[in-house]
Amino acid sequence: MRRVRPIAVVALALVVAVSSACGTGGEVGPDGTDGSQSTQSATPPDDQLNLNGTVNVRFALEPASLNTFTTAGVALDQVLLDNVYQGLVAVDTNAKDQLVPSLATSWEQSSDGLTYTFRLVQNAKFHDGSPLTSADVVWSLQQVIAPGSKSLRAQDFKSVADVSAADPATVTIRLKQRDTTLLWNLAHRGGIVYKSGTDFATLDGAENGSGPFRVTQWNRGSTLTLSRWDDYRGPAPKVAKVVFHYIIEPNTANNAELTGQIDILTASDPTLLQAFRGQEDKFSVLRGTSTDEYTLAFNEANPVLANPDVRHAIRQALDKDAIIKTFGAGIRIGGPVPPQDPWYEDLTSLDQYNPENARKLLAAAGYGNGLQLTVEYPNHYIPALSDILVSNLKDVGITLNVRVVEFQTWLSKVYKNHDYELSVVIHAEARDIGNYARPEYYFGYDNKQVQQLYRDALTAETEDARNDLLRKMTRQIAEDAPCDWLFLVELNTVVRKGIYGVPQHETNNRFPLSKLAVAK
């Protein structure tokens, strides 16, 4: 068998700098900079830290449930992945998305690529005190791959033939065919290890993970508290508690940071960063990469939007630079892949802003006299963005009605029931390109060539071959225009002085707390 180095496995060599894509930064200050920084101060020694401290963090979206097996939405991953629940492997977003050990110390892949063998850490336990063994890993994965599984990630593990345990510390996964995404998927929701026999229905308001933190309080609609678990097998967290404050409105979140209610302001509105300038003795602003694509989806089950001329017309009607300027920061990408993915290609030349041609396309589609459409728009997104969509589309003869909905309504109406015409939502999941190969996904996008390219990429023998196939797939998706990708978010995190080890990159889909620390 081929032994895989745990730190470098599936290390992704291609990383495109943000500046290579078209876009703008945050609001620029008098000194010609936007006041953000790419690094943060080193954490002081323990004797200079308050090891019993509490850190308060602002998040925008609250999860509807703590059930990671069946509940959709990255708000749940953001809180629980790495902190409360763990898988065999994890993702280090500060190291360009390298896969790193978690409950597995190492793993091996057979020469034919069909068998993976994992060695588990010693002394792992669940929060109820019971030991975590290979039997729990096997049971957890069996629930994902079982026929009729309710797991949100069942689709990600269709390549798995069986899972077995040779002894309490060894797990073997056997595949039906090569799967170049297996390790990546194991590092996410579908790879969580639960206690064998867990009734998932009991997890709606409780948890029994194996991570360094426990959920100790949830004031629904307000805060969720994680507390350090003293029986954790690894290094103890350097803070006793982390309280997540769910504050949707950006100005309210800003005021919470300025007045000391919170210590870390994630996903800060870039147009509001001016409030922290000139206060470098109190705050720092961290700039981070993201996988957060503001996506305008077209429901192709609608006969109007099934016409590619209409979809391309909408794309060409939208001024992405104006949208980014209104938002305050962002990157034009032209497709469904962020620059840090190894199969990224700059596709911004496709469907460039061209309102005159958009009118021609609409006329060719039979809508030269106008068209009315409705967009479902989550209520925590800034109204200025929907205003630009309305204005740009009006310029080409499309009347856009904006229906503002709560995010839980969006999940039910759009994501689950596919009851919409247009939809705006942030796609924050990392490497979610496979969604475009799923006709049952809420887009309703069904391209057999794309689906075949994805299947071929999954079974490719090398990473280079996989990346080439996914690059072709991405271009085909962009040319078909099942969506318009308005921009990629650039993350700004405001941190109070004296707070260290703050997650910086891709923080809307995971926020590991193990290095968080607070000065005395």
Image (cartoon, rainbow, N blue to C red):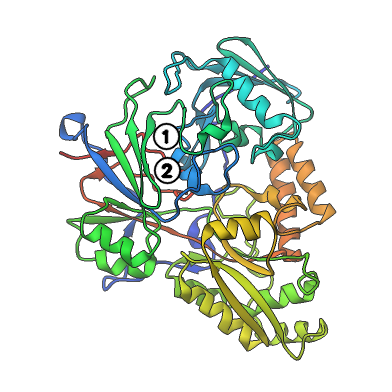
Question: Few, some or many C-alpha atoms within 10 Å of disc 2 (few <14, some 14-19, many ≥20)?
Answer: many
Q: Earlier in the sequence, mark 1 or mark 2?
A: 1
Residue at 42% over, 66% down:
25
> Which quarter of the figure has residue 373?
bottom right
Question: Few, some or many C-alpha atoms within 10 Å of disc 1 (few <14, some 14-19, many ≥20)?
Answer: many
Query: Number of labelled discs?
Result: 2
Query: Please, what secondary structure does the residue beneath circle 2 have?
Result: loop
Residue at 38% over, 28% down:
212
Of the numbered discs in the image, which one, if any, rests on residue 511? 2
Q: Tell me which amino acid carries mark 1.
A: Asn
- Residue 351: x and y in percent read 68, 73
- Residue 214: x and y in percent read 38, 31
- Residue 322: x and y in percent read 51, 77
Left or right for 70, reference 132:
right
Residue contact at pointers 1 and 2, CB within 8 angstroms: yes
Of the numbered discs in the image, which one, if any, rests on residue 83? 1
Which of 45 and 442 lies nearest the eye of the viewer? 442
Quarter of the image for the N terminus: give it: top right
Vertical side of 200 occupied by 287: above or below: below
Vertical side of 54 occupied by 279: above or below: below
Residue furthest out toward the right: 448
Q: Tell me which amino acid carries mark 2.
A: Phe
Left or right for 12, reference 396:
left
